Amino acid sequence: EYTALAARAGKHVVCEKPMAMSVDECRQMITVCHEHNVSLSIAFYRRYFPVVQKMKELVDAGAVGRVLRISAKTMAPFSPPNAEPWRLDAAVAGGGFLMDMGTHRFDLFNYFVGSPSRVLGVVGTQSLDAVVDDVASVAMEFADGVQGSASFHWNCPVGRDELEIVGTEGILTTDSLSGAGRL
């Protein structure tokens, strides 16, 4: 609704994720923005962090050779539900940890190796009394045989936020997909 109102007013649109609650809603948003000649984007900002920019520069320069695999591991302790109750409400959040954190990692996968041609996943709830997921494992296949994997856990006592790119000539790893990430 807000995207359509902004587009009809001639305003560019930046959305948080999830973009919408269904594929049909996403298509409607894309259509109304196209019809009114305004940009529609999702707030995927992690690709602009210095560590990610450096990784991209090195991959594009061939520093790791041909990319063979990309993987992400994201774990976090969940704050008490009363601190951020909207995260446990699928009608508001669109899902759980996979929707909340996974989308940023998948954006980075697209940034480095393009869109996947095949995706397999397992999603579940291990420790939260909630209707949203708190754990997910995803396997992907990209062009040229590049493989990818991602794991997400919203139920760990220690946080991790890792990205690794494996190539024929080397490996790039960061320990944080934030402004504090180290290569």
Image (tube, helix red, strand yellow):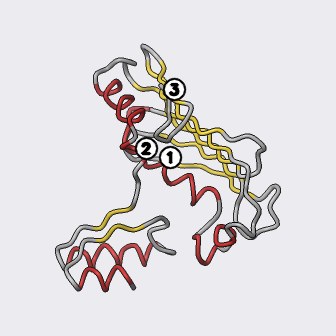
Looking at the picture, how far across and down is residue 160, in whole percent?
65, 38
Q: SS class of the residue under badge 3?
A: strand
In the image as oriented, which residue stretches furthest toward the left? Answer: 37
Q: Camera-side residue: 70 or 39?
A: 39
Amino acid type, mark 1: Arg
Amino acid type, mark 3: Thr
Mark 1 or mark 3: name the one nearer the start of the chain: 1
| Residue 123 vertical position relative to residue 161 in the rendered view, above or below | below
The image's mark for residue 1 is none
Q: Name the residue under label 2.
A: 108
Q: Distance between the residues labelled 1 and 3?
A: 14 Å
Q: SS class of the residue under badge 2?
A: helix
Q: Distance between the residues labelled 1 and 2?
A: 5 Å
Which corner quadrant holds the N terminus?
A: bottom left
The residue that appears at 44% across and 21% down in the rendered structure is: 167
Q: Mark 1 points at which residue?
A: 105
Amino acid type, mark 2: Leu
As drawn, is 6 to the left or to the right of 10? right
Q: SS class of the residue under badge 1?
A: helix
Q: For mark 2, does the 10 Å Cα neighbourhood hold few (<14), some (14 to 19), or many (20 or more) residues?
A: many
Q: Mark 3 points at which residue?
A: 173
Please say if the residues under marks 3 and 2 sit with CB atoms less than 8 Å apart.
no
Q: Quadrant of residue 161?
A: top right
In the image as oriented, which residue stretches furthest toward the top? Answer: 169
Please say if the residues under marks 1 and 2 sit with CB atoms less than 8 Å apart.
yes
Looking at the picture, how far across and down is residue 11, in whole percent?
23, 76
Q: In which quarter of the image is residue 55?
A: top left
The residue that appears at 35% across and 35% down in the rendered structure is: 53
As drawn, is 120 to the left or to the right of 77? left
